[in-house]
Image (cartoon, rainbow, N blue to C red):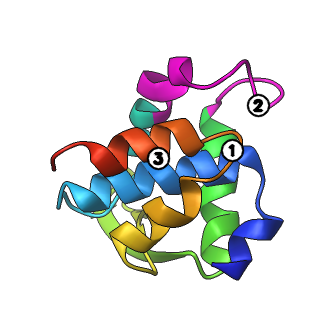
Amino acid sequence: MQALESTTPLQRFVLLAVADLDGREESAARSFDVREFCEAHAGELDGDPFGGGITRQGIIRALTALEAEGLLRENVGDQSPVGKGRPVYSLADEHEAVLDALADDDHVGPVARSLRSSPE
């Protein structure tokens, strides 16, 4: 996965969140699903590799960048209260390929390895 080399640690963590949701065969990931994953697993990381924590805007920017890099696919999900479609994201590659690629990452590798070894 060549495109991973140009991503930030937060983008890789967000990609891992989408991979986890995809692996559990849930519907495509929404930004709030990704944020829940990130907040739940942030304690498994060494320190704060994101330089400022995990924010809603940071996650949205990461999802947008990952889609632009071709690592995620964006679709329109459900309607917001004001009638706009909320984007949902799915992996552009296979779930296992993404976990394997992230397993060696210095920042998110431990979480990727634990997800890879856990039953789905």
Taking 88 as reference, is 49 above or below it? Answer: above
Taking 68 as reference, is 29 above or below it? Answer: above
- Amino acid at the residue labelled 2: Pro
Residue 50 lies in the magenta stretch: yes
- Give the distance between the C-alpha atoms of the residues marked 1 and 2, in whole angstroms: 8 Å
Q: Nearer the viewer, residue 103 or 36?
A: 103
Label 3: state its secondary structure: helix
- Amino acid at the residue labelled 1: Leu
Coordinates of residue 80 in the picture (x, y in percent)? 36, 53
Label 1: state its secondary structure: helix
Q: Nearer the viewer, residue 87 or 23?
A: 23
Which one is in front in this view, the residue at disc 1 or the one at disc 2?
2
- Amino acid at the residue labelled 3: Ala
Residue 77 lies in the magenta stretch: no
Coordinates of residue 104 in the picture (x, y in percent)? 62, 53
Relative to 79, is 32 on the left or the right?
right
Relative to 6, is 66 on the left or the right?
left
Mark 3 or mark 1: whose residue is earlier in sequence: 1
Magenta extent: 38-55
Q: Which residue is mark 2?
A: 49
The answer to whether residue 31 of the structure is visible from this angle is no
Q: Which residue is mark 3?
A: 112
Residue located 17% across and 61% down the image: 25
